[in-house]
Amino acid sequence: MKRKDRERHAWSLRSLAVATLVLLILLYLLAVTFGIVASASRLGTPEIILVVALLAGLAFFDVLAEFTFGTTGLTFKLKRVEARQAELESEVDRLTNRVTELFLNTMAPSMYDNLVKLRDRRRGEYSLGNDLKREMTQLRDAGYLEDFNADGLPPKCDVLADYFTITPLGRQFLELRESLSRTAQPSSH
């Protein structure tokens, strides 16, 4: 039997069971109404609720992921809703990762290198010309460097970190970008 045929067959058996239960419940209610069932033999509210829950469970068995009845009330979760929620969460995670990757890689390579030099206090022969001042100003404006006096900088220096201080946000940016680089590299197995 094909899967769709099996599903239709299972649904028809379930429909028959549900229809039978509905008929029995209606007959019971008619019997109670016409006094055929004695007061002492009648079902109480909890029993009726359980029968209705059983009926709903049979009717919606293939779409329910969870069905509970307790002191907090009746709880049920639909499989289709849960599957869609998981799919949406996965899409949001992928989008978040893509946006994060895009953000972390939009900084100019020279600005990124200068931020790394500051963090690592690298020595070298640095010219503090207009290009470097412009990049450092952009890094400061982004919150990655503490404020500095651009007019008070000498024309050259050996350690950039003597004149510019990286902020915790700048360090966090570098950590995130480096972790992104590590995860993007294929493993060497």
Image (cartoon, helix red, strand yellow):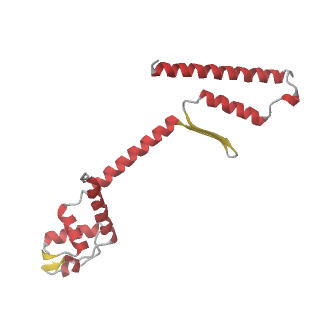
The residue located at (83%, 29%) in the rendering is 42
* Number of numbered discs: 0
Q: Is residue 142 above or below residue 55?
A: below
Is 76 on the left or on the right of 23, as rendered? left
Is 104 on the left or on the right of 25, as rendered? left
Is 165 on the left or on the right of 85, as rendered? left
**Residue 167 placement (x, y as % from top left):** 31, 72
Q: Would you say residue 101 is visible in this rendering?
A: yes
**Residue 157 placement (x, y as % from top left):** 14, 80
The residue located at (71%, 20%) in the rendering is 23
The residue located at (46%, 22%) in the rendering is 3
Q: Is residue 84 above or below residue 112?
A: above
Depth order, front residue of 12/52? 12
To which quarter of the image does residue 148 belong? bottom left
Depth order, front residue of 187/97? 187
**Residue 166 placement (x, y as % from top left):** 28, 73
To which quarter of the image does residue 86 belong? top left
**Residue 12 placement (x, y as % from top left):** 57, 19
Q: Would you say residue 143 is visible in this rendering?
A: no
To which quarter of the image does residue 153 belong? bottom left
Considering every residue shown, the one lying at the far front of the view is 189
Is 79 on the left or on the right of 175, as rendered? right
